C-alpha cells in the first residue's frame, strides 16, 4: 500500500508565491475501484475536509486498504478556505457554478477546468463531493439530475450510490436549484456519465464532531461494500446520533489570525 500527499501548482501570485491544490492518494496496489473524494469547494465548509483526513488517517494507521485506490482533493478552493469564504475570492464567484470550466477562462473557470480534468483522468468509479449546508441541518445526500442528461440510467446509478451511503437523500433539478445543475461539480460529472453525488454534513465555519463521524461512517461503509477495506465485527460502523439539544450554534463568524481549521470542543 502506498500513500502520498502532494500539491498541484495552480498559479504564481504577484509576490512570487505559488498557489497550490492539495491532493492525497492511497493505492492498495491491487485491482479494485477508484474512488474520488472532494471537499471545501466552498471555502467555509470544513467538515468534509475533516472527514477526508479521518479516512486517510485510519487507512494509514491500520494499513487497511486491501483493494483499489482512493484519491482526494480535500480543499478545492484553497484561497476561499484561507479566508473562510464560500466564494472564490478573486472574482467573488461560486466555484461550484463554474463547471466544466475553461482552460483559457478567468481564474474560477480555469480552477474548475483543472479540477474536472484531474478527476476525469483517473476514471473513478465513484466521486463524493463533501459539503455543508448553510445551517446545521441533518446529514443528507443530493443526487443531481441535469436537464442535459437524456439517459436516466446514470441518475439511477447515483440513486443507488446515495442509498448505499446510508443517509437521507433527495434528487435535485434545475427547477428546484434555480441554476443549471451541470454547472456544479457533481452535476458536470453526471453529465459525463460518472457516478457522483453531493453529501451535505451540518453547517459551515467550524468542524462538528457529530457530522465528521457521520461522514466518516458513510464513506467507510461504502468502502466495505466495495471490498476495499475489511470491516470486522469490532469495527462495525454505527450512525452517530446527532444531539439536537446541544448543537453549538454561532451567530457571528469565527475568525483566526492564521490559516487552518478551528475545532471547538466543549468540556
Image (spheres, rainbow, N blue to C red):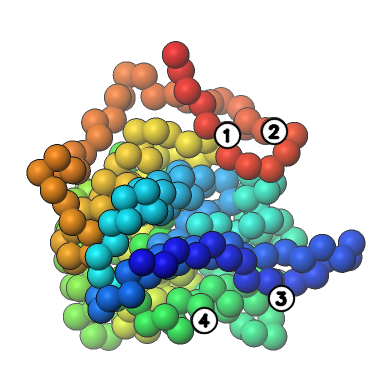
Mark 4 to mark 1: distance in Å?
31 Å
Residue 117: which numbered mark, if any?
A: 4
Residue 78 coordinates in the image, percent (x, y): 64, 57
Compared across the picture, whether 120 is left or right of 190 comes to right
Looking at the image, is mark 3 or mark 4 nearer the viewer?
4
Residue 256: which numbered mark, if any?
A: 2
Quarter of the view holding residue 27: bottom left
Q: Are marks 1 and 2 in contact (CB under 8 Å)?
A: yes
Residue highlighted by disc 1 = 262
Mark 3 to mark 4: distance in Å?
16 Å
Residue 228 coordinates in the image, percent (x, y): 23, 64
Residue shown at the point (45%, 76%) measured from the top left: 119
Q: Secondary structure at mark 3?
A: loop
Residue highlighted by disc 3 = 106
Is disc 2 surrounded by few (<14), some (14 to 19) or many (20+) residues within 10 Å? Answer: few
Compared across the picture, whether 17 is left or right of 53 comes to right
Q: Is residue 215 visible?
A: yes
Q: Nearer the viewer, residue 13 or 31?
A: 31
**Which of the two discs, 3 and 1, labels the residue nearer the N terminus?**
3
Q: Secondary structure at mark 2?
A: loop
**Which of the two discs, 2 and 3, labels the residue nearer the N terminus?**
3
Residue shown at the point (13%, 48%) measured from the top left: 232
Q: Secondary structure at mark 4?
A: helix
Q: Nearer the viewer, residue 22 or 90?
A: 22
Q: Are marks 3 and 1 in contact (CB under 8 Å)?
A: no
Mark 3 to mark 1: distance in Å?
31 Å
**Which of the two discs, 4 and 2, labels the residue nearer the N terminus?**
4
Amino acid at each position: 500500500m502506498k500513500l502520498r500527499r502532494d500539491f498541484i501548482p495552480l498559479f504564481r501570485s504577484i509576490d512570487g508565491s505559488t498557489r497550490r491544490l492539495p491532493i492525497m492518494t492511497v493505492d492498495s496496489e491491487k485491482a479494485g475501484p477508484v474512488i474520488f473524494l472532494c471537499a471545501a469547494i466552498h471555502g467555509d465548509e470544513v467538515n468534509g475536509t475533516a472527514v477526508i483526513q479521518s479516512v486517510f488517517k485510519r487507512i494509514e494507521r491500520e494499513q487497511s486498504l486491501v483493494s483499489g485506490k482512493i484519491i482526494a482533493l480535500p480543499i478545492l478552493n484553497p484561497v476561499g478556505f484561507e479566508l473562510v469564504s464560500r466564494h472564490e475570492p478573486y472574482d467573488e464567484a461560486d466555484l461550484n457554478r463554474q463547471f466544466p470550466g475553461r482552460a483559457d477562462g478567468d481564474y474560477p473557470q480555469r480552477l474548475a477546468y483543472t479540477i474536472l480534468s484531474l478527476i476525469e483522468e483517473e476514471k473513478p468509479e465513484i466521486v463524493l463531493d463533501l459539503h455543508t449546508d448553510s445551517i446545521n441541518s441533518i446529514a443528507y445526500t443530493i443526487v443531481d439530475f441535469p436537464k442535459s442528461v437524456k439517459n436516466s440510467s446514470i441518475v439511477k446509478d447515483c440513486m443507488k450510490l446515495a442509498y448505499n451511503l446510508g443517509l437521507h437523500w433527495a434528487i435535485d433539478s434545475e427547477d428546484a436549484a434555480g441554476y443549471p445543475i451541470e454547472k456544479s461539480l457533481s452535476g458536470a460529472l453526471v453529465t459525463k456519465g460518472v457516478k457522483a453525488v453531493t453529501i451535505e454534513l451540518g453547517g459551515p465555519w467550524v468542524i462538528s464532531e457529530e457530522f465528521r463521524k457521520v461522514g466518516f461512517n458513510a464513506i467507510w461503509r461504502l468502502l466495505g461494500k466495495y471490498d476495499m477495506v475489511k470491516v470486522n465485527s469490532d469495527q462495525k460502523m454505527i450512525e452517530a446520533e446527532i444531539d439536537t439539544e446541544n448543537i453549538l450554534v454561532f451567530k457571528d463568524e469565527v475568525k483566526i489570525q492564521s490559516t487552518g481549521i478551528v475545532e471547538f470542543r466543549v468540556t
